[in-house]
Image (cartoon, rainbow, N blue to C red):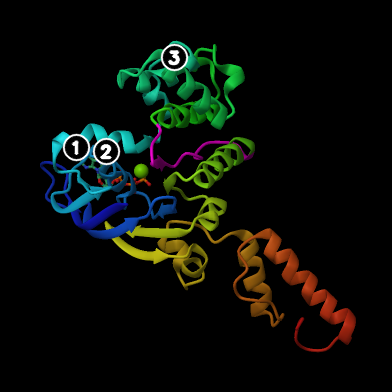
């Protein structure tokens, strides 16, 4: 369990607190997304998960280990794998394989164990075929996957990722999200900073941060339905939701909670089926 208790944080020499009393928990196996406008403190919060930053006041524990105690840092970093915003900064090996082996190598494990972990991590992100390639010769999407493989080789219980789909094309983005799904099914808890709608809707819980304060903590869909939720998260309302809202304002009987193209298609088909069955009457499908 990851536990944040009344965490505040100010960078050294800065008068202003970036985190202002964050309290929440992440259970093993859970998938939590963290969202909010630029500069609201998401990256700062994430860095607290593996003791890269220590709260100014308040407490954080990872499976009972308080991050304030420096002796716990190696064990905390083994339990919480961190994938940063810029994957280039995490690359250390001359080949993909060597890069993934770096972390387990530092644990002083026997060579056979390191090999097993490297194989498993590369398979988990589908990079087996590129194991001899130089990391510098990978695409942006492949570098993200390599960074994920590098932390998976540490066999973490929790994975913290800072906007892992930013700057990726739709295929690269889907690949990363699929990998995260698979890892969660295998029991790894995920804390994922994102502005990606699919990623938000797919999570168990959405934590929204606003000026260093947690504004929402709950099921993503329920939060996104609240008035003003999109702008509060630093997001644009998806065009399909705007379209249906516009039609509703024009008097078309459509549900108010449509967020995706799939849902919009179902709502419109329902409306058309209702019209076919009942002639041009008011009201929509049952
Ligand atoms: N090393 C630092 N020293 C001082 N202030 C910092 C430092 N890093 C970040 N900040 C400030 O802390 C605040 C929160 O930054 P943070 O990077 O956590 O935001 P964020 O939500 O991740 O933003 P983004 O969406 O742009 O990535 C910002 O006002 C930023 O300027
Ligand atoms: Mg950030």
The circle on residue 98 is: 3
Q: Nearer the viewer, mark 3 or mark 2?
A: 2
Residue underneath mark 1: 72
Q: Position of residue 155 (x, y in %)?
A: 40, 33
- Asked if ligand 2 lies within 8 A of label 3, the reply is no
Name the element at disc 1. Answer: helix
Name the element at disc 3. Answer: helix
Q: Earlier in the sequence, mark 1 or mark 3?
A: 1
Q: Are marks 2 and 1 in contact (CB under 8 Å)?
A: yes
Q: Earlier in the sequence, mark 3 or mark 2?
A: 2
Report the residue at 40% width, 31% height from top: 151
The answer to which image quadrant residue 105 occupies is: top left
Residue underneath mark 2: 76
Q: Are marks 3 and 2 in contact (CB under 8 Å)?
A: no
Residue range of the region highlighted in magenta in the rendering = 155-170
Q: Is the residue 121 above or below the residue 26 in the image?
A: above
The verdict on residue 16 being magenta is no
Q: Is the residue 86 above or below the residue 215 in the image?
A: above
The answer to which image quadrant residue 70 occupies is: top left
Please state if 16 lies on the left or on the right of 121 as rendered.
left
Report the residue at 74% width, 64% height from top: 265
Q: Position of residue 141 (x, y in %)?
A: 55, 30
Q: Position of residue 66 (x, y in %)?
A: 18, 46
Give the spatial CA distance, label 3 vs label 2: 23 Å
**What secondary structure do most residues of the magenta stretch adopt?**
loop
Rendering quadrant holding ligand 1:
top left
Q: Which one is nearer the viewer's eye here, 196 or 23?
A: 23
């Amino acid at each position: 369990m990851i536990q944040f208790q009344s965490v505040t944080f100010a960078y050294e020499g800065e008068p202003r607190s970036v985190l202002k009393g964050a309290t929440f928990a992440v259970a093993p196996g859970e998938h939590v997304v963290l969202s909010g406008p630029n500069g609201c403190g998401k990256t700062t919060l994430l860095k607290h998960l593996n003791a890269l930053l220590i709260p100014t006041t308040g407490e954080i524990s990872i499976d009972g280990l308080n991050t304030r105690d420096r002796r716990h840092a190696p064990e905390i970093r083994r339990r919480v794998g961190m994938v940063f915003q810029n994957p280039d900064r995490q690359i250390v090996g001359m080949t993909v394989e060597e890069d993934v082996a770096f972390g387990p190598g530092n644990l002083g494990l026997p060579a056979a164990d390191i090999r097993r972990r490297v194989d498993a991590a590369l398979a988990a992100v589908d990079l087996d075929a590129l194991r001899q390639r130089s990391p510098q010769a990978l695409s942006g999407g492949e570098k993200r996957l390599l960074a994920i493989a590098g932390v998976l080789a540490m066999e973490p219980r929790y994975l913290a990722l800072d906007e892992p789909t930013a700057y990726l094309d739709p295929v690269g983005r889907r690949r990363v999200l699929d990998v995260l799904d698979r890892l969660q099914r295998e029991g790894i808890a995920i804390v994922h900073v994102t502005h990606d709608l699919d990623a938000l809707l797919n999570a168990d819980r959405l934590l929204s941060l606003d000026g260093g304060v947690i504004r929402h903590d709950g099921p993503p869909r329920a939060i996104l339905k609240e008035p003003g939720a999109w702008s509060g998260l630093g997001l644009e309302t998806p065009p399909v939701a705007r379209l249906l809202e516009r039609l509703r304002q024009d008097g078309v009987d459509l549900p108010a909670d449509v967020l995706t193209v799939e849902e919009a298609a179902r709502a419109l088909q329902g409306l058309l089926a209702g019209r076919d069955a009942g002639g041009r009457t008011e009201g929509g499908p049952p």
